[in-house]
Amino acid sequence: MSDRYCVIGNPIAHSRSPDIHAAFAAQTGHTLVYERCLAPLDGFAATVGGLVASGYRGASVTVPFKLEAAALAGQLSERARAAGAVNTLVFADGVIFGDNTDGAGLVNDIVHNAGVAVAGKRVLMLGAGGAAQGCILPLLSQGPQAIVVVNRTRASADALVERFADAAPGKVAAADFADIDGPYDIVINATSASLADTMPAVPSQAFSPTTLALDMMYGNKPTRFMAFATAQGATARDGLGMLVEQAAEAFFLWRGVRPETDEILTRIRSAL
Ligand code: ATR
């Protein structure tokens, strides 16, 4: 029987992950099944228990279960611990291993797909929720000059910076929107503002014609943040590349091979 995987979330019907993993499997010649799994809001642990008992080999985890997945995993990777969240579970040898591939996906998209090095750069991170937190350690591993975290609620930005104070002293700082100077080399929108078709109050001086502006959200048209960045002359990018890259990293964890993402990213985009 084929190895089985799934993506667990609530809601889950909209998830693109089955298409992405089916494409990875076809490309690499791996035979596997990857399904959508709707878990009840109060039934994540029971759902995972059922998957393990049924012989599943792993699962992706999406909204709203990433924090619960971190609590449930018997072992965590360093990057999952730093993120405080898990988006990939591996079921092997009776252990539930939790990893977080979101930050690696973001970094791979910036460095390899957009062709922009993070090393030595000034990075502005908008937002201080789970999406932002998951990306700090992978960004730091690239050796940026600085990461400035700006959040509407300043206390969350301060708490996020505090988490990474020992890992990289002086590299990560918090600021308020009103204090944003610039320009920055890379501006990342990790707020959920785009979901509400709005944008964080980032001023135009954060951007320049050499800035890469990346919104973690994606859709069939540019977000307000992307349109604003483009109007300042920056190069804007949505979160679809990050989505495909985090999936490629999960596929590597499960299958030991790293799929090529270019053609799959193009195909998934044309289906949006
Ligand atoms: P996620 O796990 O996706 O990061 P989250 O933990 O709910 O989700 O965090 C959402 C982030 O988007 C927060 O940083 C939030 O700012 P607050 O902490 O001040 O709430 C930010 N956010 C949401 N809507 C925003 C908006 N319109 N402008 C600026 N920031 C916004």
Image (tube, rainbow, N blue to C red):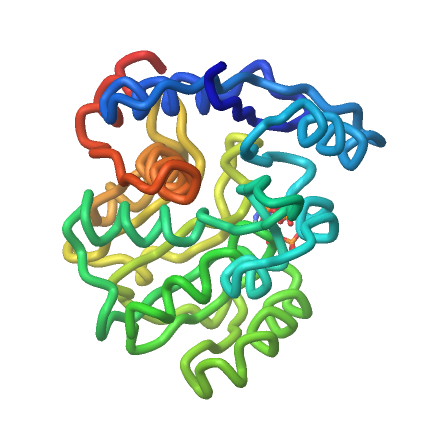
Indicate the position of residue 233 as horizontal and vertical percent values: 18, 48
Q: Quadrant of residue 30?
A: top left
Along the line of sight, the residue nearer the viewer: 190 or 101? 101
Please indicate, yes or no, whether residue 239 appears anywhere in the rendered image.
Answer: no
- Estimate the x, y position of residue 228 in percent, counting from the top left: 33, 42
Q: Is residue 130 above or below residue 184?
A: above
Q: Is there any visible trace of residue 224 in the rendered image?
A: yes
- Which residue is pictured at 15% across the width and 57% down the height? 210
Q: Residue at x 37, y 52 (%)?
A: 104
Q: On the image, which quarter does residue 154 sit in?
A: bottom right
Q: Is residue 168 above or below residue 205?
A: below
How far across and down, in percent of the image, does residue 46 sit? 80, 31
Which residue is depicted at the point 19% across and 48% down? Answer: 112
Q: Residue at x 55, y 42 (%)?
A: 90
| Percent coordinates x, y for residue 118 in the rendering | 25, 64
- Which of the two residues, 119 or 52, is positioned nearer the viewer here? 52
Left or right, 177 with respect to 258, comes to right
Left or right of 113, for residue 48: right
Image quarter where the C terminus lies is top left
